[in-house]
Image (cartoon, grey):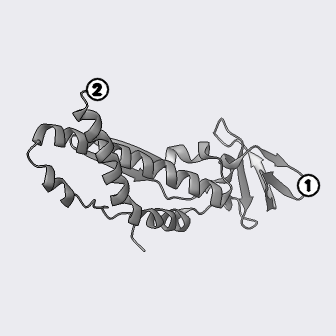
Amino acid sequence: MTSLNTNMELDTRFLARLSYLPDELAQAAKQAMIKTNRWLRAASMADLGYELSIDTKAMTTRFRTYKNGGMSKLWVGVRSLGVHRLGKPVQNGKGVQVGSRFYDDAFISPMDSDQLLVFRRENKGRGSIKLVSLEISEETEEIIDSYLPDLNRKFEEFFHREFQFILSGAK
C-alpha cells in the first residue's frame, strides 16, 4: 500500500520518441498531466462515495487539484469526515439518523456552527462531548492505490489525444 504522502510518478519515457517537437510536446504533456489529475480525482471520489455511501458533494472539499507551472497536483484530505456531511441529521429518542446510518446515544446541536452537527457524550464529564465522525483514510488510500497501475496508461491516452489536437491545428 502506498502512503498518501508520497509522490506519484508518471512514466514518460515514450515522450523521447517525439523529441523533435519540443514546444508542442511540452504543451500536450502539460494538458495531459492536468487531465490525468482530474481523472484520478473524479474516479477516486466516485469510488469512495460509492463504497462508503457518501454523496460526492461531501467529498469535493477533500479532493483538490492544483496547477503550478508545469506540474499538476492532487491533494487528498484523509481526516475523518463529520457525519453531518452525509445527509440531514434527524433526532429521535434513541439517537440520530443520518442518511441510512444510525448513531446510538447521539444528539444534534449547532455548537458555534451554521450546520446541525452530530455529537456523542463519551462519559458523564462536561468536556466529554465528541463530534461523531466517519474514518475515511484507509478506504481512500486503498482506492487511490487501485488506480495507480492505470495512471500511466491514462496519461499516455490523454497525451496522444492532446497531441493529435495540437497537430490538427484546432486551437
> Residue 29: x and y, percent?
24, 45
Identify the residue at the far bottom of this view: 1
Side (left or right) of 138 relative to 83: left
Nearer to me, 38 or 57: 38
- What residue lies at 65% left-to-right and 35% top-to-bottom? 114
Q: Which residue is mark 2?
A: 170
> Residue 130: x and y, percent?
66, 59
Q: Is residue 68 visible?
A: no
Question: Residue 57, located in which quarter of the rendered image?
Answer: top right
Nearer to me, 123 or 60: 60
Q: Secondary structure at mark 2?
A: loop
Q: Amino acid at mark 1?
A: Gly
Q: CA distance from mark 1 to mark 2?
A: 63 Å
Residue depth check, mark 1 versus mark 2: number of the one nearer the observer: 2
Q: Amino acid at mark 2?
A: Ala
Q: Is residue 125 above or below residue 17?
A: below
> Residue 102: x and y, percent?
80, 59
Nearer to me, 79 or 20: 20
- What residue lies at 34% left-to-right and 46% top-to-bottom? 158
Identify the residue at the far front of this view: 168
Q: Quadrant of the C terminus?
A: top left
- What residue lies at 60% left-to-right and 46% top-to-bottom? 56
Question: Residue 112, located in which quarter of the rendered image?
Answer: top right
Nearer to me, 115 or 112: 115
| Picture disc at residue 93 | 1
Give the mark nearer the N terminus: 1 vs 2: 1
How many neighbours does mark 2 have within 10 angstroms: few (below 14), some (14-19), or many (20 or more)?
few
Q: Is residue 58 above or below residue 104?
A: above
